[in-house]
Amino acid sequence: MIIYILKRILSLIPVLFVVSIAIFFIIHLTPGDPAATILGIEATQEQIAELNEQMGLNLPLYQQYIQWVSGVLQGDFGQSYFMKESVTEAIWSHLGPTASLAILAEIVALVIAIPIGIFAAYRRGTMVDQSLMGVSLIGMAVPSFLLALLLMLFVGVYLQWLPVAGYKPLSKGLWEHFQYLILPAISLGAIQAALVARMTRASMLEVLDANFIKTARSKGVYEYKVVLKHALRNAFLPILTVIGQSFGTLVTGAVVVETIFNIPGLGQLIINSIVRRDFAVIQGVVLFVSLIYVTINLVIDLLYGIVDPRVRLERK
Amino acid sequence: MKSKKISLVLALFVVVIALMGCGNKADKNSKSEGPGDAGNTEYKSEINVAVTAQPPTLDPSMTVSQVALNIAGNVFETLYTLNANYEPVPMLAESVEVSEDGKIYTFKLREGVKFHNGEEMTAEDVVASMNRWVTTSSRAKSLLTNAEFTVQDPTTVVLTLEKATSDVLIILATKAQFPAIMPADIVAAASAEGVNEYIGTGPFQFEEWKQDQYIHLVKNEEYQAVEAEASGLSGKKEAFVEDVYYHFVTDHSTRIAGIQTGQYDIAESIPLESYEQLNSSNDVKVHSYDGGALTAFYNTNEGLLSNVKIREAITTGLKMDEILLASFADADLFSLNPGYMNPNQTQWATNAGEGIYNAGDVEKAKQLLQDAGYNGEEVTLLTTKDYGEMYTATIVIQEQLRQMGVNVKVENFDFPTFLERKNDFAKWDIFVASTGYQLTPPQLLAVTPDWAGTKDPKITELLTAIRSAESPEVAQAKWDELQGYLYEYLPSSVIGHYKSLIASTNELEGFTVFEAPIIWNTKVIK
């Protein structure tokens, strides 16, 4: 098992290496440079050239890449051109809001989706099943920005129940923190809820037909135990995959929702950094997010082994 | 079993609705925070402003970013500033004496003015700040070449100029890259990227900058106001709130929603299409103010438009009224005027160029194109969707050029790419830009060679004549002549003038807008 984990971790290195090359060259070959953006529309070409030199952006690309990568290997992601802080500081300060938002959105998604999925599978083919799946189809089809704007207008502006935008850290109090995140979490979680609900239903359907369920029932096991213990546990593997992937998507895909609700998370950081052509920050965030993504996938793979011991045996 | 499932789902909805209910209470609580002033009306102790983006710095001499300058204007003050009529009036200076040859300006400083660090402002500080500005601000470098400030005594500062010019005080009072007065040791410690500490003399002092969230200013308890009546950026300033928050809110629908719910007291850069909607709301006020000029810039250096006859033909065919209506939607929000300068700044208002401006004569344009030997060459319009009005205007121009028989294509990029391509003359023929007003003709981007490539000896000559004019009337006449010439040489063509919008809640008292929302002298009713 330990060797398996080590192998999996080692296999991440080439992935991250390729990501680092891709992101570095894509960004640097994109037109528009940080100096011109920082100096604004009225800057002269001479001033732009001067600032580029100060920031080390006139060196050949491969030299800049080597400089960056050797820094990253020593834990130094570089300095933001625009913000007066290092890239590491910028990522840390923007990570909290995104993590809070993603966790809350995942909770929203799971709390809605799993009961609905189980229930729909259990009542397969009935009106209830069809209407729940119909609603989930809408959930998948409505883009999160539209839901975000609708929620903002209805709950924020019309009912004035929750603030329309902004963010307060957890240190300001639990409610202060959560009231800013509820609407974004719903907008972000809805689409995931729909996905997870459909996956749960499909997975449960397969298991509910299996012989061991019939056996359990014939042995007189309580119905709720049959569904929640016997069926759900066996149906959980594919659901876990979807949950894992959806969490990755929540972390990386919060860009639009963070912009609309003005939450200073990683999504907003990357959008702002692209607009400012703040190369060091873009590179740092993309690399960091890739790391999160591959780590989540790794954790899911390892969890497989815990949920279903057969997986573990096969890979030994 | 079934009923258990149903009750689980129901319980979930109850939880969600209960959570929303809590929001209601919390919102009401938050409205009652902060101590108010005594009297019948209670006032809030903070003001929240939503701005469009995070500025790159708050060091005024380093940036032309409007957001940065608007915020920094609360923290820093200048020797001279502008009143509501765009005239330079003293702020940190008490008075000025100008030598007969116009080359030496002696400024008497106000006494007892304290910086936010508690130290009193001296001539040393002023000289250090002003000399830094003269060398770092690109504007000061080109308009006040080799100017130098020296200390005469602790309350007197002398400015020595290479050449006498008529616009010194107004340049000192200009908002873009303004010469902020700060302590000498902070100036000395400044790096190429700007100062490390924001310490000025203004009614508010810098407290905190939360990256990508907000800038927090607090009241300067020891502020020394001048006695004169408040006007524009000048006169008596009083801080009525303890805290000012400038929130960075990039999404405009969020800024609008925030002003409707009272989460923000003021929201800048309201998109013009929301004008009607907000104007009809009872809780929100919309303030319109002079925004700037929308101008089409032609490539005089390379390609088809380096031929003045082609530029003339194109300008003859353009219908500026159509472009403006499409770009600004509401007739209240734009005006037709050939002037490059702010038409409300009476000194520089002129109609020179009226004949060709907004002629909209497509047939004549076709004829002129034919006479100029136009042979179906492609004309590239460069634009960016990041500025809605610039993009819309470009699309309308594209259609109008098509009607004149010009083979035209539009290239649209994000703003940083747009900037890069604008600086490469091989890549564009025309671009439209909305730019804020300048206070004097030599500051116009349209005559700055480094900007859109306008190089012409007659323009330079007339600019020199304006600056060295012995009286305002002579300067005015020379500007009239220059604007007339700009409509002959056509390095660019003004499309029209637009208003900008700021929204505020109805709870503000004493609030004014002069180029930007003015936070001092503003009270917020609880």
Image (cartoon, rainbow, N blue to C red):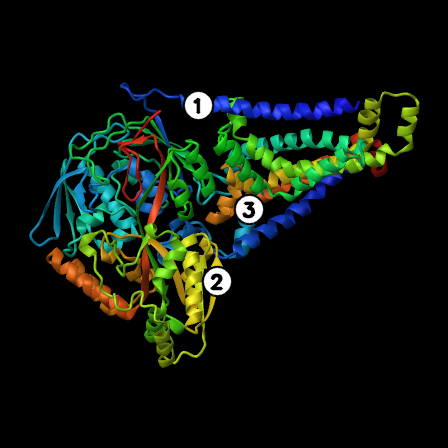
Q: Which residue is mark 2?
A: B411
Mark 2 and mark 1, same subunit? yes
- Badge 2, how many Cα within 10 Å: few under 14, some, many 20+? some
- Residue B511 seen by the camera: yes
Residue A47 vs A149, above or below: the answer is: below
Q: Quadrant of residue B156?
A: top left
- Badge 3, how many Cα within 10 Å: few under 14, some, many 20+? many
Q: Number of numbered discs present?
A: 3
Q: Is residue B325 left or right of residue A179?
A: left
Residue B273 vs B19, above or below: the answer is: below
- Residue A138, given in percent of the width and then of the height, sits at 66, 41
**Of labels 1 and 3, the one closer to you:** 1
Identity, as a three-letter code, of the amino acid under mark 3: Gln
Q: Which residue is mark 1?
A: B30
Q: Which residue is mark 3?
A: A283
- Residue A277, given in percent of the width and then of the height, sits at 48, 49
Q: Quadrant of the C terminus of chain A?
A: top right
- Badge 1, how many Cα within 10 Å: few under 14, some, many 20+? few
Q: Quadrant of residue A135?
A: top right
SS state under label 3: helix
Mark 1 and mark 3, same subunit? no
Residue B514 vs B329, above or below: the answer is: above
Badge 1 vs badge 3, beta-carbon distance below 8 Å: no
- Residue A298 seen by the camera: no
Identity, as a three-letter code, of the amino acid under mark 2: Glu
Q: Is residue B14 left or right of residue A63?
A: right
